[in-house]
Image: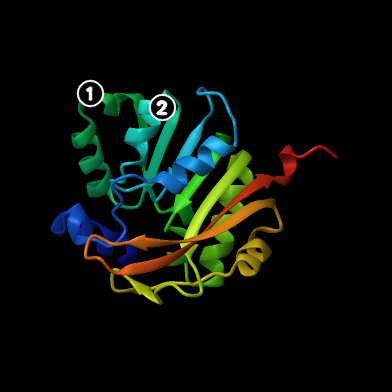
């Protein structure tokens, strides 16, 4: 078991949602970006690093039925399944480090809030982008710490991004649609500044 997986299994074993900084009662920004793509409820959505986030609950409420949640922590996904009860059967759950994810499936929407910024080496970033370029058929929305955000999270170093840096990283396979920044208020009332951007997969754009 990798050090990263050990870390996240320990976090989700030992801490409750109100004890971690990323918890959101309503993931409104993510929902707004997903809604902005104007895709039918049959669209395939994958939530990268979804953990026990409530995003899946809200997507199910909206009527989406092709939802996949991927996370490195099995414990995180088990918590989400327990919370959802029978509704968990409507969701595909994948325990995997995103940098090692292999799939023949293509997804209409790739959502990532706060997973990408934990990839701190160029090799990790390149693996992530290679997976995304293969797996995303239409749109990506990604949220990372901005350059005004924290330099560490959950005891780990992170990469901070500006709009220009994130756009540059994704330029090989994606074209930026729009970006916003917002302050996330943590359960302990501290502020974390996030950058959220949406992108079109270049293979989905007309020539």
Q: Measure the C-alpha gap from mark 1 to mark 2.
A: 17 Å
Q: Nearer the viewer, mark 1 or mark 2?
A: 2
Front residue of 3 and 85? 85
Identify whether 28 is placed above or below 11.
Answer: above
Q: Secondary structure at mark 1?
A: helix
- The answer to whether residue 133 is left or right of residue 17 is right
**In percent of the image, x 32 and y 34: which residue is there?**
57
**Residue 203 drawn at (x, y percent):** 73, 41
Where residue 5 sits, quadrant-wise, is bottom left
Residue furthest to the right: 207
Q: Residue at x 35, y 27 (%)?
A: 61
Find residue 161 and report its horizontal and vertical position in percent. 54, 69
Choose between 17 and 29: the one closer to the eye: 29
Q: Within 10 Å of the Cα at label 2, are there few (<14), some (14-19), or many (20+) other Cα atoms?
A: few
- Identify the mark at residue 107; answer none if there is no mark: none
Please provide percent x and percent y for residue 53.
31, 46
Residue behind mark 1: 86
Helix, strand or loop at mark 2: helix
Pointer 2 residue: 62
Residue 101 visible in this rendered orientation of the protein: no
């Amino acid at each position: 078991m990798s050090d990263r997986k050990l870390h996240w299994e320990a976090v989700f074993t030992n801490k409750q949602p109100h004890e971690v900084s990323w918890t959101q009662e309503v993931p409104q920004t993510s929902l707004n970006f997903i809604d902005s793509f104007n895709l039918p409820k049959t669209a395939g959505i994958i939530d990268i690093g979804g953990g026990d986030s409530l995003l899946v609950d809200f997507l199910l409420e909206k009527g989406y039925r092709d939802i996949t949640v991927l996370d490195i922590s099995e414990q995180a996904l088990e918590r989400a399944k327990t919370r959802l009860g029978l509704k968990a059967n409507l969701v595909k759950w994948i325990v995997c480090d995103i940098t090692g994810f292999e799939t023949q499936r293509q997804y209409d929407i790739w959502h990532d809030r706060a997973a990408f910024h934990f990839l701190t080496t160029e090799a990790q970033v390149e693996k992530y982008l290679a997976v995304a370029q293969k797996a995303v058929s239409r749109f990506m929305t990604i949220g990372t710490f901005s350059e005004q955000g924290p330099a560490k999270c959950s005891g780990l170093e992170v990469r901070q991004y500006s709009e220009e840096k994130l756009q540059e990283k994704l330029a090989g396979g994606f074209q930026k649609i729009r970006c916003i920044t917002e302050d996330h208020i943590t359960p302990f009332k501290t502020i974390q500044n996030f950058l959220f951007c949406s992108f079109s997969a270049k293979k989905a754009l007309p020539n």
